[in-house]
Amino acid sequence: MTRFALTVEFDGRPFMGWQRQDHGPSVQQAIEDATFAVTGERTAVHAAGRTDAGVHGAAMRAHLDITKPITAFRLGEALNARLRPNPVAILACEEVADDWHARFTCTGRAYEYRIVNRRAPLTWEKGLAWQVAQPLDAAAMHAAAQLLIGQHDFTTFRSAHCQSASPLKSLDVLNVTRSGDRIEVVAEARSFLHHQVRSMVGCLALVGLGRWSIADMGDALAAADRARLGLNAPPDGLFFMHARYPD
Amino acid sequence: MTRFALTVEFDGRPFMGWQRQDHGPSVQQAIEDATFAVTGERTAVHAAGRTDAGVHGAAMRAHLDITKPITAFRLGEALNARLRPNPVAILACEEVADDWHARFTCTGRAYEYRIVNRRAPLTWEKGLAWQVAQPLDAAAMHAAAQLLIGQHDFTTFRSAHCQSASPLKSLDVLNVTRSGDRIEVVAEARSFLHHQVRSMVGCLALVGLGRWSIADMGDALAAADRARLGLNAPPDGLFFMHARYPD
């Protein structure tokens, strides 16, 4: 048995999310089916994180175990051939130690959320960004974001379906930058609660619109109450950017 | 009658090109139909340039004449509402002088061509970039590109269907830059021949692959012979970026 680590790019639009579902297509299933087509083996693919329906992956990390002898290069090429026409691509495939685990060995995760701040609808970015028609104050959004940095009870920004044992998380980075009509929010942490990035971005947008003050963000966090969530941003703009591992 | 200048973004994938066609949808027709829905007037929309099937527009300029009294803001908003679900967006709409012409007043056009240089297939950029699996030498491509700068007979890089009176064109900019696995080619000129950018990019790719020397590019240009064209790049990666006007 050989364990392989994958780096996966995927367009989340046609999927119910990363995780295998009974009621629709998933990225996990697409890769598991491609693996079966290549190796004849039914094997589970484990990812660094689960993504919701409509959320994209720029460099998701995952691993799988294969019994049949095959090189990492051949496996990556063959998976890409079998993944067509799904919008899922294996960017890299490498052999790793048997105890390397895409999820449990991961020490850091980074997401990016893309907002297009303009009145005109999106064209080729439809489903790949959140279009916000009213002007957003990105500087105010960034200031409010800094109130969320550090270890907090993030219950306000947590989905009712979150399976995490604790609402306590430590947020390392939450940067908001504007370039023309594009606003990018970068979030980095060891791990996130379910919906945490989208919920934080939704509330940052309320600050950007002037409907929340910067202090309102701190109050919402301190309340540790899901009922205080102002807005959950749509999945469209969210990209899993990278996963960090020791060495 | 009032003349309005439009700035248009469009995803070229579902269209036969900018220009109205009998055999399929076009960007021009989408805007003309939306205009009719808004104003009840059948009016021609003139663009700074015609784009081929599958080519995209980031900020195409166009103009149209409306008899009915309407403000530029209202016209832009109403066109966007009526353009749905076409991937065409009016980014800006402004009143201009009656003698302003999107095509004839235009003094400069800029295109960008996007290449993704990697083995893995594209996911969300499928149809929005040209995936080239073999490694490209972007520095060699840039060096070869410089041989095309200036006024030349560009017959080698001209479609058989080109309607331009002369194959003589003056190329101002042809820059090739790499960032990670992305290569961008920026082309600027007063005007271009039909297929000129795609043909230049196709030959630059041959240089990047090592199948053409840099000198081969100069020879192909000097031959002024369409039979010497090495490769026409696909439309997928081509974006009309902007049009320049006096003032």
Image: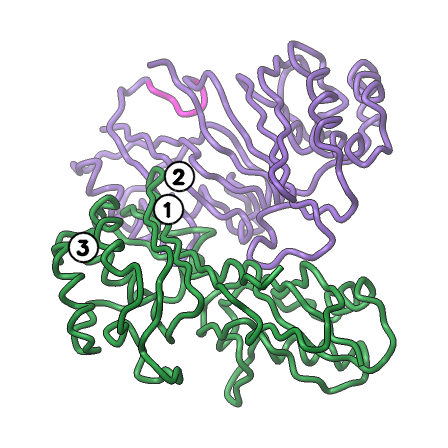
Chain colours: A purple, B green
Asked whether the residues under the numbered discs 1 and 3 touch, taking CB atoms below 8 Å apart as contact, a structural biologist would say no
Residue B133 percent location from the top left of the image: 25, 51
At 60% from the left edge and 51% from the top edge, which residue is drawn?
A127
Query: Which residue is most to the top?
Result: A151
**Residue identified by numbered label 1:** A89
Q: CA distance from mark 3 to mark 2?
A: 30 Å
Which numbered disc, 3 or 2, marks the residue closer to the eye? 3
- Could you tell me the amino acid type at mark 3? Val
| A102 within the magenta span | yes
Q: CA distance from mark 1 to mark 3?
A: 27 Å
**Residue identified by numbered label 3:** B207
Residue A27 percent location from the top left of the image: 46, 44
The mark that comes first in sequence, 2 or 1, is: 2
- Could you tell me the amino acid type at mark 2? Val
Which numbered disc, 1 or 3, marks the residue closer to the eye? 3
Query: The C terminus of chain A lies in which quarter of the figure?
Result: top left
Residue A149's place in the image compared with A135, above or below, is above
Quadrant position of residue A95: top left
At 58% from the left edge and 25% from the top edge, which residue is drawn?
A187
Quadrant position of residue A220: top right
Residue B36's place in the image compared with A53, above or below, is below
**Residue identified by numbered label 2:** A8
At 66% from the left edge and 31% from the top edge, which residue is drawn?
A195
At 80% from the left edge and 29% from the top edge, which residue is drawn?
A229
Q: Are marks 2 and 1 on the same chain?
A: yes
Q: For mark 3, name the chain.
A: B
Q: For mark 1, name the chain.
A: A
- Could you tell me the amino acid type at mark 1? Ala
| A198 within the magenta span | no
* Span of residues in magenta: A100-104
Q: For mark 2, name the chain.
A: A
Q: Secondary structure at mark 3?
A: helix
